[in-house]
Image: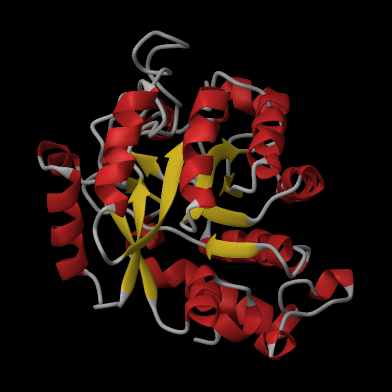
Amino acid sequence: MQLQKLVNMFGGDLQRRYGHKVHKLSLHGGFSCPNRDGTIGRGGCTFCNVASFADESQQHHSIAEQLERQSRLVDRAQHYLAYFQAYTSTWAEVQVLRSMYQQAVSQTNIVGLCVGTRPDCVPDSVLDLLSEYHDKGYEVWLELGLQTAHDKTLHRINRGHDFACYQETTRRARARGLKVCSHLIVGLPGETQAHCMQTLEGVVATGVDGIKLHPLHIVSGSTMAKSWQAGRLQEIELAQYATIAGEMIRHTPLDVVYHRISANARQPTLLAPLWCENRWAGMGAINNYLIEHGTQGSALGTPWSPAILL
């Protein structure tokens, strides 16, 4: 697989900047979600079952214990990024967040924080806290779950915020020097390739440092699972995903780093599409598409090559 030669991938970006491998270690801070606890809504996003991507048992261990365990599970690296992944990792009082983030960076091999959250749960006080770590030299990424720039779809999937909210949060974060990574889903109900391209255009125009692409997973325990089981929801096929994701990548400026271009989930939580159980399937299909049609930025007339950074 030649992805590093085709796409400005996060792993390669980190290795170039640090001179060695840097891995992300996923953490569970025991946070809730305002779209589940009634603050914004109940039931959560229609696609969501956190168990499909986060280890719920982790929340019973301290941040230090989780980091130590996670570092044993991944390939050994000299340094790591602490990734607060599950639920809404800014949904707490600032002093609670400070305690958790501080526990993470206190580990000698941690060089930064990645904080996954919602665009509507990032007040200035949280951005100011993250800015403190940025000012101390830590790498700080604010990962915003946007999924789509189309308000009609956001309402349909019960996100509880609009695209304007995402834009406003992104601008406030980047004004403080924080890096923003936007999570986007390909294959949402009612959306075509044109919708996905418009989402990419809106995100790039707002200003973004990184992107994560995910195919829509239909997972047990989600509202979408009921629609799929009733035959009212079509799953995305591998070739279709590769084409849409490939074109999004080809239309992405070179300075935007792709943290992920596909994602996987495990059975029995994963119901469809079953190709998402194999973590390499999506990446391999996109790899082949880009080999045939062009690298990141090629549709903009500026094809990606690691040599441009030398």
- Which quadrant would the C terminus be assigned to in this image? bottom right
Q: Residue at x 36, y 51 (%)?
A: 83
The residue at the point 60 percent across, 66 percent down is 242
The structure residue drawn at horizontal position 50% and vertical position 73%, both measured from the top left corner, is: 14
Q: Picture quarter containing residue 63?
A: top left
x then y, percent, for residue 105: 31, 53
User: Percent x, y for residue 91?
Assistant: 39, 24
For the rendered model, the colour scheme is secondary structure
- Is 161 positioned to the left or the right of 197 in the image? left
Quarter of the image where one finds residue 162: top right
| 195 w.r.t. 259: above or below | above
The answer to whether residue 116 is visible is yes
Residue 63 placement, left or right of 13: left
Residue lying at 60% horizontally and 21% vertically, measured from the top left: 161
Rendered position, 120 above or below 170: above
Q: Is 200 left, or right, of 169 in this rendering?
A: right
Residue in front for this viewpoint, 81 or 228 = 81
Q: As drawn, which residue projects farthest toward the right?
A: 301
* Residue 129 image position (x, y, % from top left): 47, 35
Q: Nearer the viewer, residue 195 or 171?
A: 171
Q: Position of residue 222 (x, y in %)?
A: 35, 29
The number of numbered badges drawn on the structure is 0
Furthest-front residue in this view: 136
Residue 27 shows up from this direction: no
